[in-house]
Amino acid sequence: MRPGLPAGPHDVSAVAATVFRVTTEELTTSNYQHLPPLPETWQKVLGEETDKPYYAKLDAFVAAESAEHQVFPPREEIFAALDATAYEDVRVVLLGQDPYHDDGQAQGLCFSVRPGVRVPPSLRNMYKELNADLGLPVPKNGDLRPWTKQGVLLLNTVLTVRAHEANSHKKQGWETFTDAVIRAVSEREQPAVFVLWGGPAKTKKALIDAEGNRVIEGVHPSPLSASKGFHGSRPYSAINAALAELGYEPIDWAL
């Protein structure tokens, strides 16, 4: 029995309506907080964002969605990208869109899926290009966490999604938050390489100081567009060349 319910028979639909139907307005006006705290190194540069009205509305929206629907990734992995790569360690920012929306896929890192989960089509194309570009064997799983340990921030521009409904959490506040992430990295004293694949990612170029940082633009690896310029673009070599210009060691892309 769920805590807070009186003993005895209940109409399941009525209980669900009572327990789970929480409106965004109700949650915004309370002290409820659904989103997990920011990782410490990011809290220092993004803490002011969490005090802004848009963030309270975003928090309430995700809470209401989570009460009524399945939401990916799990709450504890919403900020997985920031957890995996500390602010001061970022050397490359690879932008995605919103999380994978099928069961068991999303782990809070753009393009990445857990070991044992079938590699999604866009990531398969990334692996094909990895092989063509650097001669590396095609990885056997879709887990990109080894890249994050070398300073690759795998950042989606929207950090949650309703199960099986792509873009369902778009324009609810996440873009404002992740824009702040991009600006925070761009404005650091130590520069970074920003990788913008596809139209939506390229709109973020305006947020980046292109004089101090490096920006690599390209075609998205989606099956809908990969043949229009992603294949043959050698993005991994380009990223490492840009890192060398900035005085950094190259990324070891092998997985």
Image: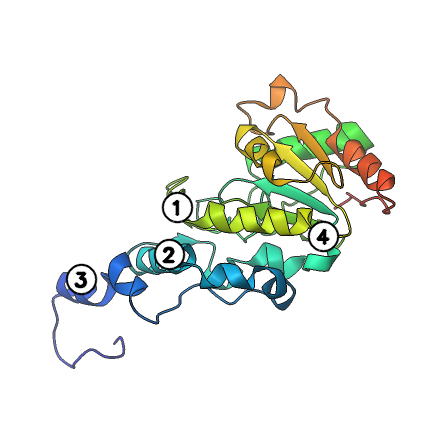
Q: Which residue type does callout 1 highlight? A: His
Do the CB atoms of the residues marked 3 and 4 lie less than 8 Å apart?
A: no
The residue at which mark 4 appears reads as: 188
Q: Residues within 10 Å of mark 2 (few under 14, many from 20)?
A: many
**CA gap, disc 3 and disc 4:** 47 Å
- Quarter of the image containing the N terminus? bottom left
Q: Residue at x 52, y 40 (%)?
A: 97
Q: Residue at x 22, y 67 (%)?
A: 19
**CA gap, disc 2 and disc 4:** 30 Å
Residue 89 vs 213, above or below: the answer is below
Q: Residue at x 66, y 29 (%)?
A: 217
Residue 96 vs 114, above or below: the answer is above
Do the CB atoms of the residues marked 2 and 1 lie less than 8 Å apart?
A: yes
- Measured from the top left, where is residue 48 in percent x and y? 52, 62
In terms of image quadrants, where is residue 199? top right
SS at mark 3 in the image? helix
User: Is 136 on the left-hand or right-hand side of 62?
Assistant: right
Q: Which residue type does callout 4 highlight? A: Arg
- Of circles 2 and 4, the one toward us is 4
* Mark seen at residue 169: 1
* Mark seen at residue 62: 2
Q: Residues within 10 Å of mark 3 (few under 14, many from 20)?
A: few
